[in-house]
Image (cartoon, rainbow, N blue to C red):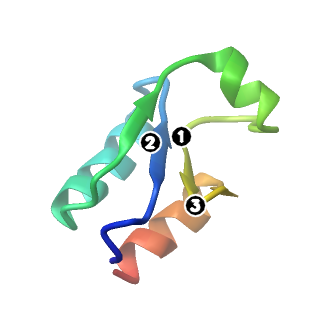
Amino acid sequence: MNNNTNVTFYTTHCPKCGVLEAKLKEKNVEYTTCEDVDIMQSKGMMSAPGLEVDGRMMTFGDAIKWVNSL
């Protein structure tokens, strides 16, 4: 992964959030964390967790696929 990649992890600390966070750590992905539900909703998120990579929003399923591809 490019060191200039900007990754934001959106979480409510649910079990699925834990799965995604563990995968991010396993792949040594550097990320910032956002726990603000208002921000998540403003970005169109209907459920957590989510991932934003260089401005591209991903649902849980897409985020898992992205992390696994690293």
Q: Can you tell which quarter of the image residue 5 is in?
A: bottom left
Left or right: 53, with 37 as reference point: left
Q: Is residue 4 above or below residue 9?
A: below
Q: Can you tell which quarter of the image residue 36 is in?
A: top right
* Residue picked out by circle 3: 54
Identify the residue at image location x=35%, y=47%. Answer: 31
Residue 28 coordinates in the image, percent (x, y) = 18, 62
Q: CA distance from mark 2 to mark 1?
A: 7 Å
Q: Is residue 47 above or below residue 35?
A: below
Name the residue type under label 2. Answer: Lys
User: SS of the residue at dot 1?
Assistant: loop
Q: Quadrant of the N terminus?
A: bottom left
Name the residue type under label 1. Answer: Pro
Q: CA distance from mark 3 to mark 2?
A: 22 Å
Q: Quadrant of the C terminus?
A: bottom left
Name the residue type under label 3. Answer: Asp
Number of other residues with Cα within 10 Å of mark 3, as a class: few under 14, some 14 to 19, many 20 or more? few
Task: In this rendered view, identify the residue nearer to me: 60 or 57.
Answer: 57
Q: Earlier in the sequence, mark 2 or mark 1?
A: 2
Q: Can you tell which quarter of the image residue 62 is in?
A: bottom right
Residue at the limit of the structure toward the front, as seen here: 4
* Residue picked out by circle 1: 49
Identify the residue at image location x=29%, y=56%. Answer: 24
* Residue picked out by circle 2: 16
Q: Is residue 3 above or below residue 10?
A: below
Residue 39 coordinates in the image, percent (x, y) = 68, 23
Left or right: 13, with 52 as reference point: left
Residue at the limit of the structure toward the bottom, as seen here: 69
Task: In this rendered view, identify the residue nearer to me: 18 or 26.
Answer: 26
Identify the residue at image location x=40%, y=83%. Answer: 69
Q: CA distance from mark 3 to mark 1?
A: 17 Å
Number of other residues with Cα within 10 Å of mark 2, as a class: few under 14, some 14 to 19, many 20 or more? some
